[in-house]
Image: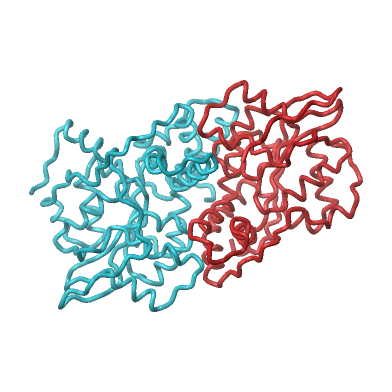
Amino acid sequence: MSLRLSTLQRYRDGVLQLVRSGRRSPPKPENQPPQLPPGWRIDPPDFVGVGSARSGTTWWDELIHAHPDVVRVPGVPKEVHFFDRFWEGAFDGADADRYHRFFPRPSGKRAGEWTPGYALDFWTPPLLRRTAPDAKLLLLVRDPVERFRSGLTLTENRMTLDWKQRASANGGFQRGVYADQLLRLWAAFPREQVLVLQFEQCVRDPSAQLRRTFAFLRLDQAAADDIDIERRVNETKVRKVPMSDWQRRLLVERYAPENARLAALVPELDLSLWQSSLGGRPTSGGSAAAARTAAGTAAGTRI
Amino acid sequence: MGPGTPPEVPEGWSVGPPDFVGVGAQKAGTSWWAALIHEHPSVKRAGGVAKELHFFDRYWESGFEASDIALYARYFPRPSGALAGEWTPGYMIDFWAPELIARAAPGTRVLVLLRDPVDRFRSGLTHTDDGSRAALSSRDAAGAFQRGLYGQQLQRVIDAFPREQILVQQYEACRADAAGELARTFAFIGLPPATIDAGRFSRPVNPTTARKIDLTLRLRTALLDGYAPDIERLRSLVPELDYSLWPSARGV
């Protein structure tokens, strides 16, 4: 299929589709490496997506894997979740070898995975660097307020006790503090090995962003023309949890300084696409201070 | 966890917003420090009121109304001339709390006690788990790490309150010079100097009884690298702290 630059209506449908899309079921605690097809070899992954949950990573991962030079053995999930349990640091060569076994490929092909929690788990970037030092890292970010709202669906049916609501709200907030995640990635990897993608830019101009992604992965960019970018991915039937005006306004204001820090690190992000960067309705006496801080941070004060 | 019902107001006492609210940090000596504050003869707490009210925990889910502001004040009866307050270390973590505290108690003094984040992480893990190492999960570790992101947390406090209403102190400094640091706390809250029984200074309150985990070198390194950006942020927000007291801040 060839790339169809859509009409406005199709474009809007695509956005709604993505916004509605859910996440796959939680990872199995022990993913087993696949059988090695004859003639294929095992190497560290060529690329690893490290974030962010609820930001369109399943869509983008599928598009990358639609490239003719990217392979994934059946049975290997998009999200390997390999490093989740190694937080104490007990990780040795056998563990690294086991991770590599998830990425068989014939000669000349590329392989990788995308686990959105890697960027959030503070212990993962250094382990990833040890295990796949040359891997290209992908961080796909989305307006943190929309990301937060999208994540509420997941907690709705599981979290019922009051304190868990509180814990899940705090956990959801942290997932949208991208600057800290990026700085931890940069502490472990050379900056040129990390590509930050913006969901909203991917939606607005998927072809250009896919070419950019392929170029970063040293893949043939022209293949983007032959990929059906509007493929529907990961649709869910789960009912969305509405956010109150107060919750949305609060998130917008609390994310504003965090977004400003991110913008200072990644100038090519277009934060005008993010509601949470436009500032909320002024309320308490703190809003002016928040705006000052955001401006100061964006202007390049120490991060 | 919630605040329970408001206390009876003793005869001759009156209610009002708290004069001070401690907002953080967990496992940073706040129970000890709150107990010392309440040793001051002009600080009163009505019977049955906890150190940690957790009043704002549930307001992420529900709206915060004028009646909630009035309800909060009912936890702070005090006789004429005395002060009252509370210290819930989780307030600083909850991204919605500082703004609500500012609405419920706009004139209050905000107290923050911080501790080296890696030490806090180590203490915080036992706090969640009672020392059964096998039961510790990556989720516990991620949560314990996030509770030590002081820069991000203080940003929200500073956005909600005038800077001069916030006092940030260090657990390590309090351990080294309890009398001196307590005098700072008293003065900041607006209390006259008072001599507190020195025996109280060394008496542990809410100590960690569970065995702390040993950090592997790799975990310690990951924590130091992980906290570095936030410590840098904290340094720009609160430059007056003595960062040489924190092993985690060396080299930042």
Residue B249 at least partly seen: no
Q: Height in image: B121 above or below A290?
A: below
Q: Height in image: B222 above or below B203?
A: below
Residue A126 at least partly seen: yes
A293 or B121: nearer the viewer: B121
Residue at the far top in the pictured view = B66
Picture quadrant where residue B207 is located: bottom right
A5 or A22: nearer the viewer: A22
Q: Residue, x 80% and y 23% (percent of image)?
A: B14
Q: Residue, x 47% and y 63% (percent of image)?
A: A123
Question: What sort of colour scheme is used for the picture?
Answer: by chain
Q: Height in image: A95 above or below A67?
A: below
Q: Is residue A256 left or right of residue B149?
A: left
B55 or B218: nearer the viewer: B55
The picture places residue B92, in percent across and down from the top left corner, at 61, 43
Note the chain letter of the cyan one: A
The picture places residue B167, in percent across and down from the top left corner, at 72, 42
Note the chain letter of the red one: B
Q: Residue, x 89% and y 41% (percent of image)?
A: B193
Q: Is residue A105 left or right of residue A81?
A: left
Picture quadrant where residue B159 is located: top right
